[in-house]
Image (spheres, grey):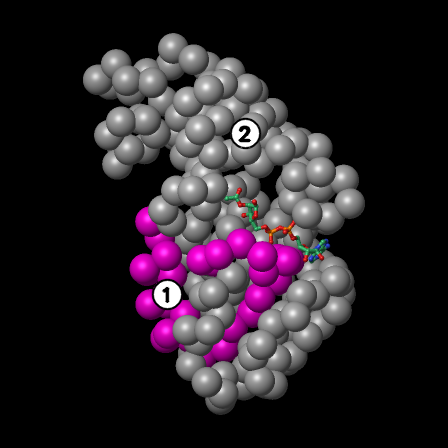
């Protein structure tokens, strides 16, 4: 049985990572068009790099929380595939084995020209840091207005799901938010979020709680499906 998890920034909130649209969320403090678009990169590389350097540094100060750990527990019983909108590495650090990052990864960078070449990058990235061919490196992040290269494989995973868990996302950003509609009709679909958005899925099981408690309840529920 394949359990597909669609996670958003809310799963990392209890680790101390900011969400985007909650009170004091990242998009309350920064304008998307100043830091997370190709135009911002063109106009103000230092500003964009500073934004992502700060967020990369923050990863050293945070650790996975019980929400991430619940999904690791789920792997003891089921095949679990996480599709995350998050650019942090907390799923991996918790121990989840199969994690697909839809919106990129903070700890990676890529050449701004030949963007297939991706490098691990634990420290700050500066203007003047270049790839092997001498081209400027950029954050390995999907910016607004850019394609989401992993959306095809993510869609295929959703089509194969036997159960789906949505956790910690406001479901406002597409194409990620549309993935849930590729899940086969009738499979159990859970949505764990203390402030869940309206999601038009018949029979949706909403757990209006934080991930750190709500996901453990879902894990217990799903274990009942194990034959
Ligand atoms: P949002 O900030 O839009 O939504 C965060 C969600 O997490 C909300 O629904 C909150 O209610 C919920 N939440 C808060 N605390 C929680 C907790 N302890 N447990 C569970 N849920 C909690 O963030 P995302 O939906 O992740 O994209 O945003 C999607 C995308 O928009 C991000 O990947 C990012 C952003 O712009 C890019 O940067 C491309």
- Left or right of 199: which side holds 5? left
On whether residue 180 falls in the magenta region, the answer is no
Q: Secondary structure at mark 2?
A: helix
Q: Residue at x 75, y 69 (%)?
A: 208
Give the residue furthest to the left: 133
Along the viewing direction, whichever of 216 and 11 lies nearer the viewer: 11
Q: Residue furthest top?
A: 128
Write the start and end of the magenta stretch as one range: 149-176
Q: Residue at x 46, y 14 (%)?
A: 126
The secondary structure type at the circle numbered 1 is helix
Q: Is mark 2 within 8 Å of ligand 1?
A: no
* 166 falls in the magenta region: yes
Residue placed under numbered mark 1 in the picture? 155
The number of numbered badges drawn on the structure is 2
| Residue 2 visible | no
Q: Could you tell me residue 162's position as x and y percent?
A: 44, 79
Name the residue tied to disc 2.
35
Q: Quadrant of the N terminus?
A: bottom left
Quadrant of res 41: top left
Q: Which is more N-terminal, label 1 or label 2? A: 2
Residue 126 versus residue 2 in the image, above or below: above
The residue depicted at 41 percent of the width and 73 percent of the height is: 182
């Amino acid at each position: 049985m394949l359990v597909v998890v669609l996670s958003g920034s809310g799963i990392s909130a209890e680790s101390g990572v900011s969400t985007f649209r909650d009170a004091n969320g990242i998009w309350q403090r920064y304008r998307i068009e100043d830091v997370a678009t190709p135009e911002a990169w063109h106009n103000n590389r230092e500003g964009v790099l500073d934004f992502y350097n700060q967020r990369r540094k923050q990863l050293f100060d945070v650790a996975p929380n019980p929400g991430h750990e619940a999904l690791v527990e789920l792997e003891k019983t089921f095949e679990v595939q996480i599709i995350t909108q998050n650019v942090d590495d907390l799923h991996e650090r918790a121990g989840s084995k199969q994690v697909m990052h839809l919106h990129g990864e903070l700890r990676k960078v890529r050449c701004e020209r030949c963007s297939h070449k991706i490098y691990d990058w634990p420290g700050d990235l500066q203007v003047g840091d270049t790839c092997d061919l001498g081209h400027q490196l950029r954050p390995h992040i999907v910016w607004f207005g850019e394609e989401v290269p992993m959306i095809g494989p993510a869609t295929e995973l959703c089509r194969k799901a036997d159960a789906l868990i949505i956790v910690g996302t406001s479901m406002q950003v597409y194409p990620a938010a549309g993935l849930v509609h590729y899940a086969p009709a009738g499979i159990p679909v859970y949505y764990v979020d203390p402030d869940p958005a309206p999601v038009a899925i018949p029979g949706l099981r909403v757990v209006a709680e934080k991930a750190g408690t709500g996901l453990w309840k879902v894990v217990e529920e799903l274990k009942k499906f194990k034959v």
